Structure formats: structure tokens, C-alpha cells
Amino acid sequence: MHAKTALALGAFIITSTTTSALADHDHSIEEITIQAFPLASQISVSPQSNPLHSPDSAELLKRIPGANNNSNGVITGIAQYRGMYGDRVSVKLDQAPTLSGGPNAMDSPLSYAPAGLLKELIVYRGITPVSQAQESIGGHMAAQFNRGNFGSNGEIEINGFARAQLTENGNQSNSDLQLVIANNQQKFSFLGSYNEGDNIEAGDNKTVAGSQHQRDRFDLAYGWTSGSTELTIFAGQLDISDSGTPALAMDIASVETDLAGMTLSTDLNGTYLNGTDLSGTSINMAVAWADVTHSMDNFSLRAAPPMTMGYRSNLATADNLSWSLDAQLPLSFGELKIGTDGNLSSHDSTITNPTNAMFQLLNFAGTQRDILGLFAELNGDMGNWGYQAGIRQNRITLDSGTVSSSGMMAMMAMMGDTANMLAMQFNQADRNLDYDTTDVVLKLNRALDPQTALTIDLGIKNRAPSYQETFLWLPLPISAGLADGRSYVGNLSLKHETASEISIGLSKRAQRFSLYPQIFYRQIDNYIQGVPSMNMAANMVSNMMSGATALSYENTDAEIYGADANWDYSINSNWSADGIFSYVRGKRTDVADNLYRIAPANARLSLRYRPDQIPVQLMVESVIYGRQKYVASYNDETQSSGFGIINIGANWSLSESIELRSGVKNLFDRYYAPHLSGRNRTGDSDITLGAAIPGLGRAVYLSMAINF
């Protein structure tokens, strides 16, 4: 098993490599590995095998300390990190901010990167450097596709992989293909992935209706390098169809997304400007574009409403253009990075009734959310301390066109009149909003002894409201994936959130054992969440549609604190163990209440065995989640019970190019409901309406990978 030594800025990386996990047997296979890079002196961490049964990259987050995902469907996991999720967590794909086309994040950011095509998923532990993301109040993650490498010489080389996996629970199948044609200067790559599955079964043979999925993902890229300069141009497409989201009011009929972009990096060694030697200076640039058309409804994949007046379809469209440009400049006392970035995004959403051509709700019209940023970051040493000091200034603007409603039936005339009044009030209001925010981050590290390092992160991070939180003029269950079943109404007077945070960590690495614990505390002023609406008109509409009063997005105050750690231990040449632990507590500080959908304390322990002379690795894994008793009363969140499951897996390298992988998830077919799963809203399921959606029951999977 190989080791890797690196000095990096607090990143925790899941990466797919072609370096063998069974290197002792000289077989080259491909696997998903985890490596930790603390902000400290150089730390070497052994990669760990992580067999996956799921095509959802968000499932990988459960293997990172402090991270998790909110599951609203099989391929719609929403990233959570240290108690924050959704728009508060920055997610980039190939250096570009991801775009979610639907107002309820059915096409969640990581759904655009199927696990089988993933090269690496980077999660920054501690506080995110200001240069990495525009708004990262809840952390930052970066996914990169596995587009292969340049060749070793001028001769054309063809390589890649083909992989197929079958999972009997839900008849799930995943197929992934990589084809790379390259020499040492040019590279063409093709990536393709196809995922599909029927309804899954939880423990006790209970079918979870609305959990089917189908997704295609394709990517073409061209790369060029001259040694000091590297250019990548890519274009891709995502298609999702007939995929259930049982925790939400509608299911995915289709998601059609086109993506394109380019990245460029160059070192200016040997370059002079007006007689000044620019050696040591590097420039990085990225530009990306995405366009999404997303349709959803509440009758195709689930029991239709009893009356046709309840049928609903929603067509949502979105697009964005993003860019970043930075220069790293060598100084006598360190390195300075300066840069600028932007992200211009627009959203539209129209709700209709296919049985009533007159019914139409224009709930988001010409909605625009734009961010322009400037940042500077200084890295250096001061005595025994290494430091990184960064500052970022963002300008966020939001705007909306006029909205409307029409076609309410006679029995809904009163609600129609009220909806028209709410639309008129919204249209007459000032809908051009501006926010100016300043982020400041200081990261410190110091070696305490040859095996131990201390890290201290201090930061102030901000987030302006989302377009849903500001422009949702009619009470609807639209919450960017919150999935609590309540109707929300927006607020044009929201202030931006401001978090003050400290994170302290240790890095301990002995000859056979390593441990990386961190503790953190975050205070959030003007935290945005739902509170009972005082708008009588909005409450009347909400009561008629959902039987409950509306929740209005308002500024509150909150705090989040906790601890997490990862560790590994080499028992001997054949046996090793590793694991993670995560604990987070989130609560409001303006009133006595807890924050919604916070992951309970959890731990994961893996024991691995590699026999001598045989290219096999065996694993048994224990996953334990505690009870979550700290729940949010504002939206009637219920407590959840703790649970534990056992997973087993095996990798067998048949040759240098063929690998078999098999395993059993939830070996004892335990029925359990993760706290981060949503509540069931599909009536034709074995799961009671309003009950927590259970996790996957026993699932046997088998995969084969061919590297060529």
C-alpha cells in the first residue's frame, strides 16, 4: 500500500487512482481512496479502499469526518458539513460553481458527478481559504472528473477503463467508461456513465416507492500541455429521467443539462515584463457555462392526487456563467495570491396543471443572482509558525421580474384572489437587492514535535440570501432541498448571514498509527431559517393548500460546534484498521430551539485484511449512528433512533488489468431510518406518509473493472 506525502491547505481528499491498493502484489487496479492532508508539516497517510454500492457521489461524504449528506432520493444527496448544508456549502465541479436547476435541488450539485467517473472529491477541513470559493460559510467541496493523464512521450497512447456494477436491491446497474487518447503534449478524453434502478427495499422487505432513478452523463475534453502551461477544454451533458424524490412534493420527470468550460494554468518561468523577471509567478484561469431544463410533477411516479385539481407540473430553467482568474506571486517572505471571480446565474419556474390549461403559477420569473469577488491571500512563515492570511470582498446582487397566478377554479376563488394580491404586492416592491460582504481567514500551523502538528483556523464568512429565500412570493414547499414538508414564503428584507468561526486541530503520525482530530465553534449572526409567518394572506393560502400555516424566511441567530477525527492503524503486514468520528451540535441562540436536520453523532470503523501472495483485500465495516434528540420545534422535526449496520466487501485483482469487487451493504438487513433522510410524501409506498424514509436494506453488489 503506497503512502503519499504532501503539504496542503487543510484539504481532505477522496480520490480515484490507478495506483494499486494491493501494491505489495504488483497489480494495478483502480479504487476510491481517502487521503488526509492537514494544514501542518508534511503528513503521509495510507490510502484506504472504499467499495461503494451507490452511484451517488454524495455517499462518499459519509467517509469524511464532519461530512454527511441529506438524502431526498437515490441520486439527489445534498452535501452537509459540520451542521450546514445546501447553499451554505460551496460545491465546485472542475473548478466551476455547480448550478442546481430546480428550486428544490432535485438535481443537487454532486448529482452532476457520478461516483464512477470521479477522480477526486476534495473537502476542506477547517475554514475554507478565501481563494477557493466565493461563498463558503458552511465549507467547500471540489469534485474533479477522471479524464486521464498525458502520455510519457510523443507516441500516441490509448488507455482507459470500462466498469460495470450490479446491485440486486432495486435491480440497480451502473456502467462507466473512460477512453483517453494522448501523448506527452495532447490528450483527448471521453467519459460516459449510465445509472438506473427500480424502487429499493429497506429492511424487513419494505419497498420504498418513488426511489427509482435513471441518469446518463457524458463528457468530452481536450487537453494540451507544454510543461509550464496546461489547458483543458471540456463539454458535457447530464440527462436524468423518471427519478423519484419521495421526500419532496414532486418527482423528476427530466433534467437536461449542457455544460462547457475551460481551465488554464501557466508558470511564467523565464518570462520578463519591462525587465522584471516573472519566474516563480503562475497564473490560473477557469471559465464555465451551464444550462438546465428541469421538469417535475406529482402524478407520474407516485399515486396521483384524488382530484385532478391537485395535479401539478413544474418547468424550471436555469443557466450560469462563471469565471475565475488568479496570479500567484513569489515574495521574499512568502507567496501572494490575488484574484477575481464571478458567477452570474438566472432562474425561472412555472407551475401548471396538465388538466387545466388556465392554471398557471409564475413563481420565479427572470430571477437573477450574480456574485463578483476580489480576493488576496498571503502564505508564509513567521518563526516556527506557518500562516495563511486571506481577505475576500464580494458584491452579490439579486433581482426578479414580475410574477403572476391565474386559473384558480371556482372553489379556489378566494385563494386565487389572495394569490393575486400577494403577486401584486411582490411586483410593486423593490426587488433589486444588493449585498456587500467581507470574508477574512487566518490559518496557522506549527510542528510540536517531529510527529505532531497543531493547526488553528480563525475566520469570518458570509452568505447572502438565496433567490428562493428572497423571491418566493407565494407559500409553497420550496426550500432548496430542506424537505420538511412545510410551505415557505420569501422575504425581501433579509440580511446576509455572518459566521465567526474557530477550528483547532492536531495531526499525529507515528510509524504505524495516525490521528487527525479537530474541534470547532461557529457563531452565525442573521442565520436564515423559517419562522411562523405573520402574514395573514400567506397563512390563508398555506392552510388551504397544506393544512398548516406558512413559514417565513427570517434572520435569526445560531451557533454550531462539535468535533471530528479520522485515524488509521497498521496492525501488521496483513491487517489494518481505520475509522472516523463526527459530532456536531446546532442550536438557535435567539430562542430556545435547535437547528433542523443536523447529523447525529456517528462513527465508522473498518478492518482490512490482505493475505500474503494473493492479490485480495477483504474488509468488514461497522457504521454506527447515535440518537438525534436535539430537533427543531419550528417545523415539528421528530427525534430519531440510533442504529448500527455491518458492511462487508472484497477486492480481487485477477490481473494487472482486471479487478473484481463484491460486497454486502447492511449485512443483517437492519431496518433503520437515518436522521438525514427526508419524510415520505409518496402515498403508494410501504412507508407510511410522513414517516422517515428508511435506509437501504441488505444489498449484494458485484462489479468488474477492466483497465486498458
Image: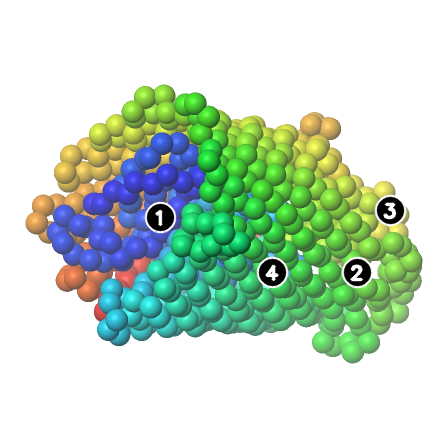
Residue 465 falls left or right of residue 29: right
Label 3: which residue?
535
Task: Please report contact status of discs 2 and 1: CB closer than 8 Å, yes or no.
Answer: no
Up the image or down, 6 lies above or below 706; here it is above
The earlier-in-sequence mark between 4 and 1 is 4
Separation (CA) of disc 2 from disc 3: 21 Å
Task: Please report contact status of discs 3 and 1: CB closer than 8 Å, yes or no.
Answer: no
**Viewer-side label of 3, 1:** 3
From this viewpoint, which residue is outermost toward the front? 275
Residue at figure coordinates x 65%, y 49% from the top left: 373
Q: Position of residue 244 (x, y in %)?
A: 54, 63
Q: Amino acid at mark 2?
A: Ser
| Residue count near mark 1 (Cα–Cα under 10 Å), binned few <14, some 14–19, many ≥20 | many
Q: Position of residue 510 (x, y in %)?
A: 26, 28
Residue at figure coordinates x 81%, y 49% from the top left: 492
Q: Relative to the observer, which residue lies in front, 499 or 356?
A: 499
Mark identifier at residue 666: 1
Residue 631 falls left or right of residue 143: right
